[in-house]
Amino acid sequence: MPLTDPRPLLLANARLIDPADGTDRPGSLLIEGGVIRDQGTELRPDSLPDGTETIDCEGRVVAPGLVDMRCFVGEPGYEYRETIASATKAAAAGGVTTIVCQPSTEPVIDDPAIVDFLLRRARDTGIVRVHPMAALTKKLAGREMTEFGLLKAAGAVAFTDGARSVTDALVMRRAMTYARDFDALIVHHTEDPNLIGEGVMNEGEFSSRLGLGGIPVEAETIMLERDMRLVKLTGARYHAASITCRDSLAIIARAKNEGLPVTAAVTVNHLTLNENDIGSYRTFCKLSPPLRTEDDRLALADAVADGLVDIVVSDHDPQDVETKRLPFAEAAPGAVGVETMLPAALRLHHAGLVPLPALLKSLSTAPAKLLGLPGGTLARGAPADLVVIDLDEPWVLDRDDLHSKCKNSPFDEARMTGRVVRTLVAGRTVHG
């Protein structure tokens, strides 16, 4: 965990947006001892602690640091793709102050000792906060559930099989029942592998034109519908890891209307790109789940705006050139995204699709609350995990400037508007 900056710090002349209470106002924010001591319009120089450093934000946005709930970190086992050090540098550059890493490492995070190893590595080499999700089933094999109680006690914040779905309904029912008894959160990737088959992109006219195998939306909706029925049966807390289509939104809406303890996330890629971005077989846009239609993208954006979709994630999944510089059908799915999550998401704000407070809530407050983590607010006494954003700075993404070890960004050479100016964790500047 990053060290606390011993000097008091005043972020002055800022636009303070706190999604936790819906406030959006000009003012200043005082940080002392790693926490937010005060904020508002009445902070005067003569009322500040001795030695306070002042930073003029020049009207830029100050908001809670982002919490990325779906981020692959290569340690242990895949350090050639990403390390905690490189992932947290990328996170800091993107305004992300907390990353929640996936269990699909080698060995798999299905043992308390591996959770402890990862937390210790994060303390030693990370510059932002790192929390692990543990495996839902042993070896991610979908056959035998892990020891939720021991893993949660070791520090696991949720349980998932990463990009794999548990296809056995009985195993999932038992896991949900067990999770309910430990008040553990299940995070599930909803794609039926039997319906995916040899598919590599969204099924439809565009896949036919490209001559590529298609993945129907039913691969997602059938699995999601099954899970909703199991949630109703067991009462477990459930989070859909990444929904991609209008039909899934209807399923989530029905479950929420029934009062089920269900939340859902969408990746920033599915909010800002569609199947047409694959163009002439761009493998950086090969994702799992696949990019869908423009109508689906717009429906997802509306769902973030009205709160039906709770959380936006990066789905950061580094892949090296050996697995991406291949024919589209053979390339590995995945894209780096933790560093570009906020700039890409700001496209929705600038397009008038999602109000900025709602967007920041889905990126910070909502994931922090769901996982029971501190942060996600500008309230007094909260951790000083913050991001300073220039909403209007234009820039072009150069993948060589990315801090991740891998450079497989679907936004390579894209024009962006809005950039992170400074990132603070426990009051200490880790970027900017």
Image (cartoon, rainbow, N blue to C red):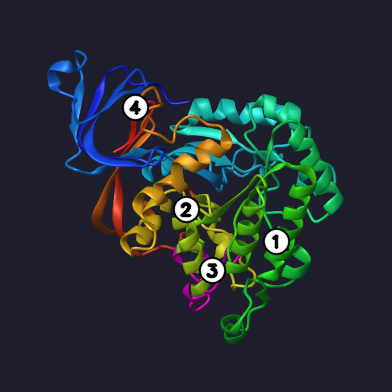
- Circle 3 sits in a helix, a strand or a loop, which is it? helix
Task: Inspect this view and state whether residue 76 appears.
Answer: yes
**Residue 223, percent across and down?**
73, 60
**Amino acid at the residue labelled 4:** Arg
Mark 1 vs mark 2: give the one in front.
1
* Residue under numbered circle 4: 428
CA separation in Å, label 2 and label 3: 15 Å
* Residue under numbered circle 2: 337
Mark 2 vs mark 3: give the one in front.
2
Task: Inspect this view and state whether residue 402 appears.
Answer: no
Q: Quadrant of the C terminus?
A: top left
**Residue 292, percent across and down?**
56, 71
CA separation in Å, label 4 and label 2: 23 Å
**At x 43% / y 26%, what residue is drawn?**
2
- Is the C-beta separation of discs 4 and 2 under 8 Å? no
**At x 17% / y 17%, what residue is drawn?**
47
**Residue 305, percent across and down?**
44, 57
Residue furthest to the bottom:
209
Q: What is the span of residues highlighted in magenta in the rendered image? A: 272-293
> 347 and 2: which one is in front?
347
* Residue under numbered circle 3: 283
Tag 1: Cα neighbours inside 10 Å, few (<14), some, or many (≥20)? many
